Every structure is written in structure tokens, then in C-alpha cells.
Image: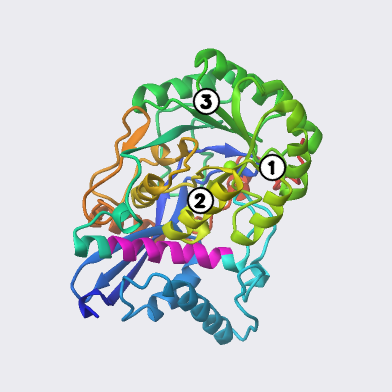
């Protein structure tokens, strides 16, 4: 065994990154959102980086895992799963809780379990996998740098040289509501609250980045307004791929109505209704609508696949290497989708350049990547890497440099960490409903179906 590959140090750096006032069915993005940057340093002196969600519950799992991976070779990424389970159980034991960290069911963090949210079910296993993913990516980055090989080579090699992404359109305000903060990020995108605002936003995305496909985050306004926005996009970009994602805000009946009305212009409808039962009902109407359903909400963990696929509730799974547990698990998901004839693309949550690099590497290795991947990246004006990714014709060229092909910008990382340290705690947990209450004090997270 080459001991130079053993992990000698782990650095966890929680940060707050600027985020525009993007609207969704639960509220609005806060001016800053938490992320966690994971660095592993090998005895050979090579540093690998990973990135994941940064709310407190992720940090609470990352800290004991950081302790337990000391001495682990960065080649042993399979071990991360059992180490994370053990670390989680030990941490729960210290808190005086009991329970096992089961794959399917809620583990020791069961008190935190919530069914719902924009990313689907939340349970201990999914939280743990989201943390493991950042360590896995950091290990693969370090291994690649040590060997002089890109991460996609460590995953078996790329099957494409470019990965296509779609423009992620949002209803949005021009500015965040006033809040007692020392600084609030601003941009020059302006408000987009009607069809013409959405088309203007899409044109800017197309001109600046070359995106060809467009996804509109819906569930914000009554469905007829969102149908009008998609119709306006179809008129402005005839024949180009369009998607609409209301994050499960609609009833089965509404979902079927929207599907019928937009079947000639959408390539898929994403999570129109909430939960596998409702999605299966909507999918059963597919003979009439002809429209595939995509999800990043009702199939987000391996245990959810069986029922959803058996019932043909979804026709496209939007993978996310964070909550599926890393790049290699993403490839396993891809193999399952291939086996069952289910399409595959990629979900995005607010992320920086490390995660975009990881997404691009794994996407390059998956043969059945059927649609352009989602990314929030253009909305993120801050980063922790020295050279931001540049889209060309809506695509990223797959990096062939060793590891992920990105380099940490340490002054930027330190500044974003300083922001996290200086925060009074209100922004360290992403809470779109709380952000919405600054504009509408009566706001509560809407029950589903909302329409
Ligand atoms: Mg979605």
C-alpha cells in the first residue's frame, strides 16, 4: 500500500454564498446560502476538494466523518459509507440517542425527518449520503491529482467531450427584501414576474451562455400564468427544449390539465405533483398527454426506485451526486435507469464551481445522459475556484487536467467563510419561507397541492 495516499488532514469550511431573490413554491432564496467545502490532504501533500450542502445538519455529520477518515487511503472511497454510518451512530450515542443508521429508514437524526421540501424526502440516510458525496469527490480529486489523471478517467473514462446544460429560469424579484444585514448582494437581472420577463431572462441566458434548452421553475403563480410563460418561451425559441418544474405544487387534476395544454412544447414535465402516488396517477394519463414526467423529488434515494419504476410513475430521473452519495453512486443510478428504460438527467441546487466540475466529470462518463443537465451556476456570482467555468454553446468542455481540474481560490474561500462566521445564525440554515416572510409576514410554506 502506498501510504502517501492516506488522508493526513481534513479541512471543513462552511461558507455563505450570495444568491439572488429567486422564487419557488416555498418562498424565495435568501441573500446568502450555506455550502460546505471539504478538503482532504494526503500524506503525500496532495489536496482534494469537494462541496456539498452547508446547513448545520450536514456540518454535524461532516465533523465526525472528518475525524474517522484519518489514515484512510483516498483510493478506499467505498469505505466512506460505513465510516459515515459509524460516525453518525457514535455522534448520536454521545447525544444520548439510540437507533441504527439504516439505508432506507430514518436513522439517529429521525427527529429531523421531514417528508417533503424541494429536494424530496429528507431522512438520515440521505443527509449522510450528501455528506459522503463531498468526501468522495475530494478523495477522487486527490487521487486524480496524485496519479495525473482526470476524475472522469477514475470513473472509467468519458464517453463525451462536452456536457450540455440548460438555462435555469426563475421568477424573481429585482432585489432582496430589506433585512437587517450589513450587505445584501445585488445584480442587474431585474425582476421577472410575467411571461415577457421570463422570455427576456431566457434571451440573456441564450446570448451569454449559448443555452439551447430552458427550464422554468414554476409553482410560484397560478398554473395558467405559468402556462402562458411557457407558451411565450415556445414562441420566442421555437422547437427548443422546454421544461416546467412546479416542485410538486399541483393536484393530479391540475397536473393533467397543464400537461395536456403544454404537451406540444415541453420535453418533460418535472414533479408536477408531490409523491409517488400522485405522480403515478399523473403518469397514468400519459396516454392522453404523451408527456414524460421527470423527478428530483419522488425518486431521490435507492429505496425509492423500486416502487416508482414498478408503477411507471416517472420517466426521467434527475440525479444529483450530492444526495445520491457521490459520483460512483450516480453511475449506479444511471445503470438502473438504463436497465428499466427510464431517462436520466441532472438536478441542480445552488452550487459553486467544485460541484459543477464534479457534475461535469460524472456526466461525461454516463452513456445514457438523455437531456441537458440543470445548473444554477450562472446565478452564482461568487466562487471558491480560481477560474470560473465558462459555458460555450450551453456546454462545458470536460476537463482533462488531473483531478477535477479546478484550483481553490483561498482568499475567496476565506472571505466567504468569514461571512459565515460573522452571520448571527439566521442565514446558516437555508429557509426560503423565512426569507419570504421579510416581504410577506403572513407567509407560511404552502400545503400541497397548492393548486
Ligand atoms: Mg426539480
Q: Which numbered mark, 3 or 2, is in the foreground of this view?
A: 2
Vertical placement of 280 versus 166: above or below? below
Residue of label 2: 334
Q: How many neighbours does mark 2 have within 10 angstroms: few (below 14), some (14-19), or many (20 or more)?
A: many
Q: Which of 336 and 88 is in front in this view?
A: 336
Residue 134 is covered by the magenta coloring:
yes
The quadrant of the rendering that contains the C terminus is top right
Q: How many neighbours does mark 1 have within 10 angstroms: few (below 14), some (14-19), or many (20 or more)?
A: many
Residue 54 screen position, x and y as percent: 46, 60
Secondary element type, mark 3: loop
Residue of label 1: 248
| Residue at screen point 58% across, 16% down | 232
Vertical placement of 227 versus 111: above or below? above
Residue of label 3: 241
Vertical placement of 418 versus 165: above or below? below
Q: Which numbered mark, 3 or 1, is in the foreground of this view?
A: 3
Amino acid at each position: 500500500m502506498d501510504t502517501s495516499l492516506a488522508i493526513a488532514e481534513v479541512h471543513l469550511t462552511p461558507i455563505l454564498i450570495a444568491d439572488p431573490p429567486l422564487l419557488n413554491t416555498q418562498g424565495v432564496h435568501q441573500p446568502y446560502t450555506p455550502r460546505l467545502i471539504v478538503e482532504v490532504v494526503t500524506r503525500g501533500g496532495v489536496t482534494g476538494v469537494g462541496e456539498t450542502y452547508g446547513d448545520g445538519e450536514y456540518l454535524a455529520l461532516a465533523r465526525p466523518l472528518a475525524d474517522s477518515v484519518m489514515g484512510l487511503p483516498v483510493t478506499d472511497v467505498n469505505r466512506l459509507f460505513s465510516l459515515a454510518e459509524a460516525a453518525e451512530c457514535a455522534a448520536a450515542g454521545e447525544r444520548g440517542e439510540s437507533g441504527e443508521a439504516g439505508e432506507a429508514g430514518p436513522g439517529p437524526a429521525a427527529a429531523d425527518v421531514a417528508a417533503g421540501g424541494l429536494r424530496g424526502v429528507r431522512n438520515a440516510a440521505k443527509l449522510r449520503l450528501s455528506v459522503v458525496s463531498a468526501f468522495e469527490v475530494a478523495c477522487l480529486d486527490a487521487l486524480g491529482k496524485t496519479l495525473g489523471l482526470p476524475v472522469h478517467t477514475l470513473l472509467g473514462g468519458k464517453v463525451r467531450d462536452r456536457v450540455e446544460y440548460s438555462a435555469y429560469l426563475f421568477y424573481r424579484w429585482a432585489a432582496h427584501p430589506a433585512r437587517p444585514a450589513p450587505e445584501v448582494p445585488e445584480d442587474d437581472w431585474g425582476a421577472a414576474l410575467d411571461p415577457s420577463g421570463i422570455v427576456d431572462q431566457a434571451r440573456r441566458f441564450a446570448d451569454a451562455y449559448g443555452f439551447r434548452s430552458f427550464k422554468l421553475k414554476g409553482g410560484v403563480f397560478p398554473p395558467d400564468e405559468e402556462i402562458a410563460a411557457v407558451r411565450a418561451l415556445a414562441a420566442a425559441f421555437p422547437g427548443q427544449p422546454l421544461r416546467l418544474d412546479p416542485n410538486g405544487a399541483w393536484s393530479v387534476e391540475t397536473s393533467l390539465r397543464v400537461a395536456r395544454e403544454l404537451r406540444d412544447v415541453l420535453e418533460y414535465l418535472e414533479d408536477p405533483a408531490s409523491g409517488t402516488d400522485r405522480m403515478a396517477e399523473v403518469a397514468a394519463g400519459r396516454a392522453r398527454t404523451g408527456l414524460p414526467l421527470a423527478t428530483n423529488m419522488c425518486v431521490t434515494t435507492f429505496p425509492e426506485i423500486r416502487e416508482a419504476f414498478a408503477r411507471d410513475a416517472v420517466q426521467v430521473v434527475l440525479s444529483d451526486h450530492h444526495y445520491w452519495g457521490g459520483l460512483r453512486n450516480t453511475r449506479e443510478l444511471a445503470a438502473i435507469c438504463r436497465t428499466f428504460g427510464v431517462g436520466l438527467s441532472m438536478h441542480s441546487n445552488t452550487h459553486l464551481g467544485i460541484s459543477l466540475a464534479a457534475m461535469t466529470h460524472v456526466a461525461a462518463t454516463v452513456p445514457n445522459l438523455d437531456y441537458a443537465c440543470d445548473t444554477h451556476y450562472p446565478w452564482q456570482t461568487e466562487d471558491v475556484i480560481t477560474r470560473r467555468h465558462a459555458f460555450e454553446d450551453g456546454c462545458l468542455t470536460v476537463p482533462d487536467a488531473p483531478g477535477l481540474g479546478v484550483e481553490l481560490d483561498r482568499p475567496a474561500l476565506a472571505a466567504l467563510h468569514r461571512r459565515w462566521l460573522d452571520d448571527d445564525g439566521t442565514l446558516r440554515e437555508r429557509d426560503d419561507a423565512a426569507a419570504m416572510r421579510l416581504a410577506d409576514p403572513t407567509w407560511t410554506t404552502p400545503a400541497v397541492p397548492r393548486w
